[in-house]
Image (cartoon, rainbow, N blue to C red):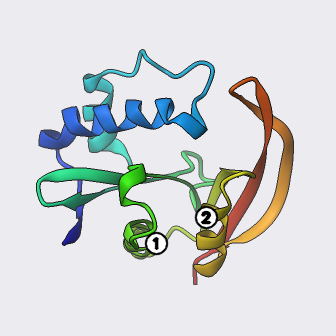
Amino acid sequence: MIKIAKNTAKDATELHNLYLTSFWEADNILEDPNDNYSILDEKYTIKHIDVYLKAKDGSQIIGFLKITRGKFTKNNHSANLEIYILPEFRKMGVATKLLKAGLKKAKILKIKRIELEVWSNNTPAIRLYKKLGFKTEGKKNNAYRVKNKYVDSILMYKWLK
């Protein structure tokens, strides 16, 4: 049974490993993963990020969602969304559960706009975001180099009422 919960300092090592795993996934490998990101950085993130949730299957963390709001008066109504699910747990509703819980928490924090960037070749994610009410607002051509190929980035947002 999948459970969604807030991250705590006790989760730092497991979340750190999951974060690094996301960089090395076969279809998403970046040329330059941030391997300087430490467990201390993760502990700081857990303590200071606006919304940081985990998805657990039993005792294993299988995914995370981060929502980080703008730091200035002019953009603190807006927040960036990041989500990652281990490949073997995809297409099981985990991302949907995490997204719904994260959006609910964002509303409580009076965040009005959630924005994200998704690679154009990640059609399952794009479908999910659209299903949950996200709209496409732009595209960055050849924004990322993945396995020596260029991939477009799709910019999406959702206005929370």
Most distant residue in the top direction: 36
Q: Quadrant of the C terminus?
A: bottom right
Residue 65 in the image: state x and y as whole percent: 41, 55
Give the vertical position of 16 relative to 3 (above or below).
above
Q: Which residue is mark 1?
A: 103
Where's residue 99, x and y in %?
A: 45, 69
Specify the farthest residue to the right. Answer: 141
Q: In this rendering, is residue 49 above or below 93?
A: above
| Left/right of residue 117 with respect to residue 83 in the rendered view | right
Looking at numbered disc 1 in the image, what kind of residue is underneath it? Leu
From this view, report whether residue 160 is shown above or below residue 152. below
Q: In the drawing, does residue 61 fall left or right of residue 84?
A: left
Residue 159 location (% of width, % of height): 64, 75
Q: Amino acid at mark 2?
A: Pro
Quadrant in the picture for residue 106: bottom left
Observer able to see residue 58 = yes
Q: Residues within 10 Å of mark 2 (few under 14, many from 20)?
A: few
Secondary element under disc 1, as helix, strand or loop, is helix
Please determine whether, in this image, residue 130 is positioned above or below residue 26.
below
Total tally of numbered discs in the picture: 2
| Residue that numbered label 2 is attached to | 124
Q: Residue at x 58, y 72 (%)?
A: 128
What residue do we see at 37% from left, 67% from top? Answer: 94
Q: CA distance from mark 2 to mark 1?
A: 19 Å
Q: Quadrant of the N terminus?
A: bottom left
Residue visible at 39% across and 30% down? 20
**SS class of the residue under badge 2?**
helix
